């Protein structure tokens, strides 16, 4: 279990135990995709979702940190030409944001080897199959989608991630 998984367990169990006393051992762990493999996935999310007018702002439930949007340090300036690349602590914050949105559903997707990733709201909104104010972020089966889904399956497709972080024209569904 990663540090972040343990932290999320404490937060989720603490929140649930505050509502009612547990009848039995209330500890439950949620499996998440590997934190160590997330940097490439984070780069795709930063490019496609992390601008200041989208998920690169504090008011969002899914917050994406990175060089083009929200920064973890007040000393870092946003913008591709700002000179400060995305920092590891920002990638970790992105990981925390993604895995905390729907931990129970994410657990099922991970346990089932990435099967039916569309159970996750993030996937449905990114694919445009559910209303998303920002429109479709990637096409189902496209490079960005393959990158994200491969991470859910436990083996990141690095070529898809490299291709997926490049922005191109996406026709509206």
Image: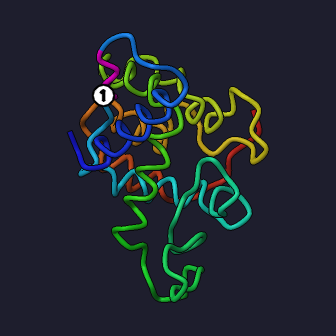
The residue under label 1 is: 29
> From this viewpoint, which residue is outermost toward the left?
1
Q: Where 126 falls versus 36 (above or below)?
A: above
Give the residue displayed 24% in from the left and 51% down from the top.
Answer: 36
Q: Where 57 falls versus 1 (above or below)?
A: below
Asked where in the image residue 8 lies, by quadrant, the reply is top left
Q: Is residue 173 magenta?
A: no
SS class, disc 1: loop
Using the image as rendered, state which of residue 67 and residue 93 is in the foreground: 93
In this figure, what is the number of numbered marks?
1
Magenta range: 25-30
Query: Is 155 placed left or right of 121 in the picture?
Result: left
Give the residue displayed 42% in from the left and 41% down from the top.
Answer: 11
Q: Main secondary structure of the magenta part?
A: loop
Query: Is 2 placed left or right of 20 in the picture?
Result: left
Give the residue displayed 49% in from the left and 73% down from the top.
Answer: 72
Q: Quadrant of the N terminus?
A: top left
In this picture the colour scheme is rainbow
Q: Where 115 falls versus 89 (above or below)?
A: above
Q: Is residue 26 magenta?
A: yes
Give percent across and percent down for residue 14: 43, 36
Q: Where 109 falls versus 71 (above or below)?
A: above
Give percent across and percent down for residue 62: 59, 48
Using the image as rendered, state which of residue 114 and residue 9 is in the foreground: 9
> From this viewpoint, which residue is outermost toward the front?
21
Give percent across and percent down for residue 26: 34, 20
Give the residue displayed 32% in from the left and 24% down from the top.
Answer: 28
> From this viewpoint, which residue is outermost toward the top?
23
């Amino acid at each position: 279990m990663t540090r972040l998984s343990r932290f999320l367990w404490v937060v989720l169990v603490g929140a649930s135990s505050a509502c009612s006393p547990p009848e039995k051992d209330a500890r439950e762990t949620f499996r998440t995709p590997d934190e160590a493999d997330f940097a490439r996935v984070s780069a795709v999310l930063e490019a496609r979702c992390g601008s200041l007018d989208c998920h690169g702002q504090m008011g969002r439930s899914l917050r994406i940190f990175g060089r083009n949007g929200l920064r973890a340090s007040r000393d870092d300036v946003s913008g591709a030409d700002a000179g400060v690349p995305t920092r590891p602590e920002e990638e970790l914050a992105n990981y925390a944001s993604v895995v905390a949105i729907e931990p129970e559903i994410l657990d099922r997707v991970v346990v089932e080897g990435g099967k039916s990733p569309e159970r996750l709201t993030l996937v449905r909104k990114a694919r445009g199959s559910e209303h998303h104010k920002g429109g479709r972020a990637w096409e189902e089966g496209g490079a960005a989608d393959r990158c994200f889904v491969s991470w859910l399956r436990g083996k990141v497709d690095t070529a898809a991630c490299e291709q997926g972080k490049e922005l191109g024209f996406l026709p509206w569904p």
